[in-house]
Amino acid sequence: MLFVWAGFLLSSRLSARQALTPWDVAALRYLGAFLGAVPLAMWLGWPRLPPWRALVVVGTAAFGFPLLAYHGFSLAPASHGGVMLPGMLPFLTAGLGVVYLGEAWTRRRMVSLLIVAAGIALLALDTFGGHPGAWRGDLLFLAGSMCWAIYTTVVRRWGIGAVEATLSAALWAAPIYVPIWWLFLPSSMAQAATGAAAYQLFYQGIFAVLVAGFLFTRAVTAIGAPRTTAITALVPAMAALAAWPLLGEPLGFAGLVGVGLVSAGMLVGVIAPTARTRR
């Protein structure tokens, strides 16, 4: 899951260099997910979420998160997306969990979030300079992260299964979005290389939606949102390290220290304390 999420950040940033508009990348994502989800639904059964719940799932996970992210990547580098998308997710999810799920913050969780916050701050300090105007993309990333935090919260609150949530997002998005994109939205698909479009369709649709979406939602239902989002806190570090050789977006000393802190914070939040035995 972590590698697919990191790949999503890198592939989304790459799309800005492939003559594809953010609207084009979204269309490829939805088409790829739909083509992959139809045979799965025929095998596993069609999702039967009530209309209101299906609307929330599709609006947050299928539309809100990726559309905001793709437009953000057209304005800011991959490292910013890593900091603001999965990096902010543990904090937004924790806040929503307190308000809507009545979750208490344990001392261990607070320590974990503080360490992650320090690491994210160092990553931001190292990478946010030298990109004038990137703050607009950062705000879009933050809004996208909030959409995914809402999705994470409602999946837990409503007890939605991973297969049902993933198939709902994959099957409903394309029929709604693609006709609107085809008729009204700006597109440069004709100028894009066939290989670039095929890559985005396959990676964004199959891996980012079906594989990563299922694994994330399954983890939320199995081990809970706090531990799952603590694990995803590793994604900013992974994306920032990979963006260095792949996209030419280097890290400095502060960024490298931030990578280490984020990793340490994730371990504190995920590894359960060993129970003491009485003699």
Image: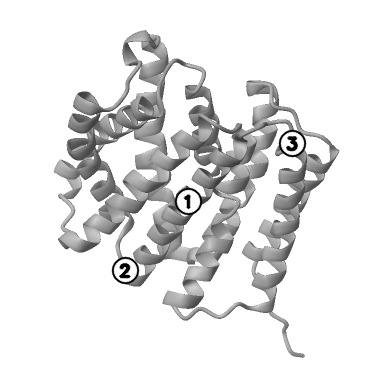
Judged from the image, the secondary structure of the residue bearing numbered disc 2 is loop
Q: Which residue is mark 1?
A: 143
Residue 76 visible in image:
yes
Instruction: Tell me which residue sits at (39%, 32%) in the image.
Output: 204
Q: CA distance from mark 1 to mark 2?
A: 24 Å
Horizontal and vertical percent position of residue 44: 19, 48
Which comes sooner in the sequence, label 1 or label 2? 1
**Label 3 close to label 1 by CB (< 8 Å):** no
Residue 239 visible in image:
no
Q: Is residue 187 above or below residue 254?
A: above
Q: Is residue 83 above or below residue 51?
A: above
Q: Which residue is mark 2?
A: 159
View extreme (front): residue: 133
In the rendered structure, the answer to whether residue 210 lies left or right of residue 133 reads left
Horizontal and vertical percent position of residue 163: 29, 52
Quarter occupied by the C terminus: bottom right
Instruction: Tell me which residue sits at (61%, 36%) in the image.
Output: 134
